[in-house]
Amino acid sequence: MTKLNTVKWNHYLNYIVVAAITLLFAILSLTGFLESSDKYLLEKIAIAITLAVSLSMVVGFLGELSLGHAGFMCIGAYLGGKTAVILEPILGEWPTLIVSLLVGGVVAAVFGMIIGLPALRLRGDYLAIVTLAFGEIVRSVFMNSSKESFGGSLGLDTPRFNKDILFIIAFVMVLATLAVTQNLIRSKHGRAITAIRDNEIAARATGIDVTKYKLLVFTVSSFFAGIAGVLYSYSNFTVQSTKFSYNYSIEILVMVVLGGMGNINGAIIAAALITFLDVELQTILTGNLAVLQDLIYALILIVLVVYNNAPKLKSFREKYNIKALINRFRPHNPSKHRDDEAKWDRVPTKIKMDEVLSVDLQVSSPYTPDKAGKEDK
């Protein structure tokens, strides 16, 4: 019973919620109660969550501004898709999927390590420019490739995985991303990473290997971006470089910022919400109203960002957030509130704090003006 009480269940809440949602929709899918459009929406949500959580490592915990996440996703989508095209007739569907995920993730991680090298000397806007240029270079290379290699400007035709199962695999990848990210951040390595974010000079002074940890974060983040790219290639019949423009990198960054810097659960909710809004607006606004899609989408994002970050709304957010509402309806149990273990009368000390200390002062010889005058002479 003691071990159960010591488990920090809030550390595993997001795993439980994601696994429960995956199980629920998997049952609905296998029993035929889930439409194809809903399955495609779930695929997009899972891919967006993977991208947002992986970028949160760089932006939220390391404190570096990266605008090249779509470039790593592009590498994974093209190379993983090409691997699927070559190997599926030979190996079959499932082995090809596993190999494609590994190829896309590993190659993207290698490029993440390469991009991590200038991050050792660049910060802020300069790093953002470098990563943005990297994403555009990658997109341009695949766009100008030959039709036989990666499809050129028309895109690469990729096999479509079973839509009844693909969203389940995508959410399993979400759980894997959460497991790696949260275990890394909550370890001693994660404390070193956040120390670099707070003050890099102080982190170096305390002996933290800044080079190693920056490369580690960029590599792991890029790996999962490549995984998301492979899932995207399986979710669509074709991979086109126009999808991976800098606008998509900014959209992923908005998910991280909207969810809260360094807040993994917030990034999950923001990614799901933004993807849902995007898909629903595309469905509702058709014909002549399609021109209003970007305008309404931008207005909704502006309202959400202002609400989530405005200082004057801080008291309102603290009063009416989900946690506060749950605590309001939760019955009060005084037995759960323990006394402060660090109170002065509980801390063991060599001298009891309630003792009165006194010092007896004894004058060896009385002071007289005549004697003082003799000593001065």
Image (spheres, grey):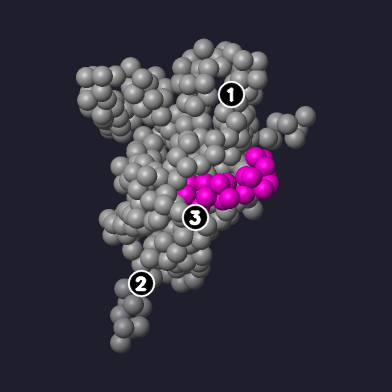
Q: Rounded to the nearest whole Å, what is the CA distance between mark 2 and mark 1?
A: 91 Å
Q: Is residue 336 positioned above or below 175 on the image? A: above
The kind of residue on which mark 2 rests is Thr
Name the one closer to the observer, 154 or 339.
154
> Quadrant location of residue 293?
top left
Residue 154 on image: x %, y % = 37, 44
In the picture, measured across the screen, residue 67 lies left or right of residue 265, that is left
**If you read the primary sequence from the N terminus, does the residue marked by circle 3 or circle 1 appear first?**
1
Q: Outermost residue toward the right? A: 1
Q: How many neighbours does mark 2 have within 10 angstroms: few (below 14), some (14-19), or many (20 or more)?
A: few
Q: Rounded to the nearest whole Å, what is the CA distance between mark 3 and mark 1?
A: 29 Å
Q: Which mark is residue 108?
A: 3
Q: Which mark is residue 33?
A: none
Question: Chief secondary structure of the magenta span?
Answer: helix
Q: Is residue 63 positioned above or below 37 on the image? A: below
Q: Which mark is residue 21?
A: 1
Name the one closer to the observer, 360 or 115.
115
Question: In this view of the protein, can residue 205 be seen by the observer?
Answer: yes
Residue 294 on image: x %, y % = 26, 29
Magenta extent: 77-96
Label 1 near label 2: C-beta < 8 Å?
Answer: no
Q: Outermost residue toward the front? A: 148
> Quadrant location of residue 200?
bottom left
Q: Which residue is mark 2?
A: 368
Q: Secondary structure at mark 3?
A: helix
In the picture, measured across the screen, residue 295 lies left or right of residue 83, that is left
Question: In this view of the protein, can residue 69 be seen by the observer?
Answer: no
